[in-house]
Amino acid sequence: MYHKLFLIFFLIIFIANCSKKEEISVRPPDEKESYKIYNEALEAMNNKEFFFAAQKFSESEKILPVIEHSAKALLMSGYCYYTINFHEEAISSLENFLRKYPADKNIQYVSYLIALSNYEQILDETKDLNPLLKTQKIIKDYVKKYPDTDYSLDLKFKLGLIKNQLAAKEVYIAKYYMETQKWIPAINRLKVVVNDYEDTIFIEEALHRLVEIYYKLGLIGEAEKTAKILGYNYNTSKWYENSYSLLNKNYKKEQKELQKKSKNDERGLVGKTIDKILNK
């Protein structure tokens, strides 16, 4: 009997203590202290101490009493990380902002910073393809969602640069396959450029590389057909000149004869002009 009473008494004391602790834990932070931390973050940012500022903004965001101020603090934390190229930390803070404050007036800007943070992590065409594809999707989604903003105008330009990098990646891999004489994979990579990235600067080289492969495999008809496409669209390109010289073994001889004829014509024109001047 006494044993049961003791257990009940102990349980009541335990629950009471837990309740007190819970009350203490949920007690709102001091308002002055929260704004003091926020102001420390602002001062650090103005002094270009961006990493420290980012941490302080993040700390203040959790305890500021006004939701608009909390949202602004988290945005500033992401911005400070972005400024010093801490892109992963910036993305984490800014994506957290989108989850916590989806109705905030700065949503467009925050989404833009996320797109930039991803874009600025893109490596060159010899590296992994996934960051390029991921960033391309993020930017396309942004432009579709906010088509008439200055942010979209900037991102559309960057989208063009991404397409060039994706095309460069395909050409880089194709040339590797060509070096190892894996002709079919090389053709497939180059056709991706021709079909999907025809508006990039790598279309000319891709067409020429196809001419090279077809010629190497003895597919002269395909080589000539591809060279005609290259010549029709890019007849002043060095890649067309390379393709033409590959298919026409007399190309260099013809070039020398044309240059010689051009010089002779030039001398003749100069001489005729002089004769006219002297005879007047």
Image (cartoon, helix red, strand yellow):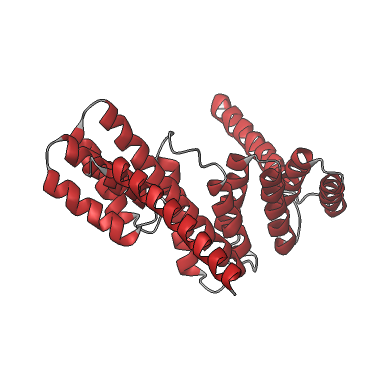
| Residue 218 appears in the rendering | yes
Q: Is residue 193 left or right of residue 43?
A: left
Q: Is residue 254 left or right of residue 109?
A: left
Q: To which quarter of the image does residue 274 belong?
A: bottom right
How far across and how far down the image is residue 185, in percent? 21, 36
Of residues 66 and 6, the one drawn nearer to the viewer in this rendering: 66
How far across and how far down the image is residue 33, in percent? 85, 48
How far across and how far down the image is residue 177, in percent? 27, 31
Of residues 255 and 113, the one drawn nearer to the viewer in this rendering: 255
Q: To which quarter of the image does residue 48 belong?
A: top right
Quarter of the image that includes the N terminus: top right
Q: Residue at x 60, y 68 (%)?
A: 278
Quarter of the image that includes the C terminus: bottom right
Of residues 173 and 46, the one drawn nearer to the viewer in this rendering: 173
Of residues 224 and 66, the one drawn nearer to the viewer in this rendering: 224
Q: Residue at x 49, y 52 (%)?
A: 161
| Residue 102 appears in the rendering | no
> Farthest residue in the front direction?
279
Q: To which quarter of the image does residue 200 belong?
A: bottom left
How far across and how far down the image is residue 170, in percent? 34, 42
Q: Residue at x 70, y 41 (%)?
A: 84
| Vertical side of 112 occupied by 129: above or below | above
Q: How many marks?
A: 0
Q: Is residue 136 left or right of residue 96?
A: left
